[in-house]
Amino acid sequence: MQIFYKEFYQKALLPIGKKDQQTLESKSSATHCLIAVEGYEDSKKKGYYHWRVTVYPASSDGNFKSSKPFFSSDQYVTFTDAMEGAKQFMEDGENDQLLSKYLH
């Protein structure tokens, strides 16, 4: 998986709820999810960016494994759309449905 670091906006550090922990089935020792909006510049169109939202396993102090995210969204056309996607992921995480809904 390509890591996007041209643009990186940490949006939320959320504790992993009981239902989402069950979804992990002991595959990760992470206690939290870090939700970030990432962007990279199009190689053919200068100044045009591709955006996605990525959810990383993290510890309570915010340390996360950038090389092994839980999952990433499809690409968003605009930064605003990606921020809305991150907002939805945050709401799902607060409702203990983030990993159970998106992790496949």
Image: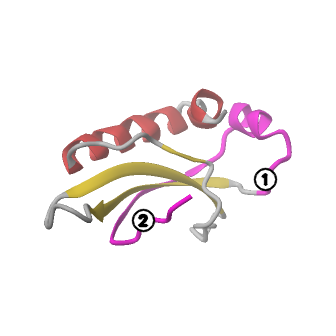
Mark 1 belongs to which amino acid? Ser
- Residue drawn at the location 35% of the way across and 39% of the way down: 85
In the visual, does 10 lie left or right of 68?
left
Instruction: Mark 1 or mark 2: name the one nearer the start of the chain.
Output: 2
The boundaries of the magenta stretch are 1-29
Name the residue beneath numbered marker 2: 4
In which image quadrant can residue 101 be found? top right
Bin the neighbour count of mark 2 within 10 Å (Cα to Cα): few under 14, some 14-19, many 20 and up. Answer: some
The relative height of residue 65 versus residue 90 in the rendered view (above or below) is below
Residues tagged 1 and 2 counted as in contact (Cβ below 8 A): no
Between marks 1 and 2, how big is the CA–CA gap? Answer: 22 Å
Bin the neighbour count of mark 1 within 10 Å (Cα to Cα): few under 14, some 14-19, many 20 and up. Answer: few
In the visual, does 98 lie left or right of 78?
right
The N terminus - image quarter: bottom right
80 or 17: which is nearer to us? 80
Name the residue beneath numbered marker 1: 28
Q: Is residue 44 magenta?
A: no
- Residue drawn at the location 77% of the way across and 40% of the way down: 24
81 or 96: which is nearer to us? 81
- Residue drawn at the location 49% of the way across and 65% of the way down: 3
Task: Report helix, strand or loop for mark 2.
Answer: loop
The C terminus - image quarter: top right
Task: Report helix, strand or loop for mark 1.
Answer: loop
In which image quadrant can residue 48 be found? bottom left
